[in-house]
Amino acid sequence: QVQVVESGGGLVQPGGSLRLSCAASGNILSINAMGWYRQAPGKGRELVTSMGKDGNIRYADSVKGRFTIAKDSAKNTVYLQMNNLKPEDTAIYYCYVLERFDNYWGQGTQVTVAS
C-alpha cells in the first residue's frame, strides 16, 4: 500500500499564490507519475498537471503559465506552485501517485479563491 498526503490548501484572494505539497510513503518500488487533479463544486474531476518518471509534464490549458509542478524524487514528494489564482481555481485538489501500475489518491485539500 502507498499513502498519499497533501497539504497547503487554504483561502487566498484573487491574484494570490499558494503552494501545495504531496508526499507519498509506504510500499514504494517505482513511482511512474505524480500529479494533481481538482474537483470544483458541481463539476467532475479534471487533470491539473502531471509529471512522469521521465520528467515529462502536462498542464491543463486553464493553468498554463500560472501553475508549476516540481518534484523531489528523494522525498517522493511533488509540489504545486499556484500563482495568479482566480476564483475559478476554487476546488478540492487531489494528488495522485502512479506506483508501478496502481493509482493512489490523497484525501484532497481545499483551495478557495475569493475576495
Image (cartoon, grey):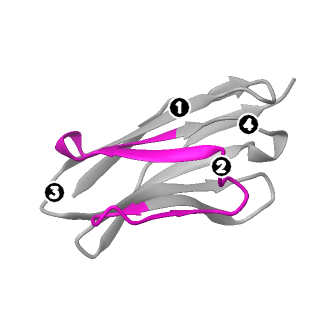
Residue range of the region highlighted in magenta in the rendering: 51-80
Who comes first in sequence, dot 1 or dot 2?
1
Q: Quadrant of residue 13?
A: top right
Q: Residue at point 81% right, 47% down?
A: 88
Determine whether the residue tagged by mark 2 lies in a helix, strand or loop: loop
Q: Residue reaching furthest front?
A: 65
Q: Which residue is mark 2?
A: 65
Kind of residue indicated by mark 1: Arg
Quadrant (top left, top right, bottom left, bottom right) of the N terminus = bottom left
Q: Residue at point 87% right, 23% down?
A: 115
Q: Which residue is mark 4?
A: 85
Kind of residue indicated by mark 2: Gly
Who comes first in sequence, dot 4 or dot 2?
2
Q: Residue at point 12% right, 62% down?
A: 29
- Residue 73 place in picture, x, y as percent: 23, 47
Residue 67 is covered by the magenta coloring: yes
Tell me the CA gap for discs 4 and 1. 11 Å
Q: Which residue is mark 1?
A: 19
Q: Does the image show residue 97? A: no
Q: Choose mark 4 or mark 2, whichever is in front.
A: 2
Task: Identify the mark at residue 28; answer none if there is no mark.
Answer: 3
- Residue 18 place in picture, x, y as percent: 60, 29
Q: Choose mark 2 or mark 3, whichever is in front.
A: 2
Tell me the CA gap for discs 2 and 3. 32 Å
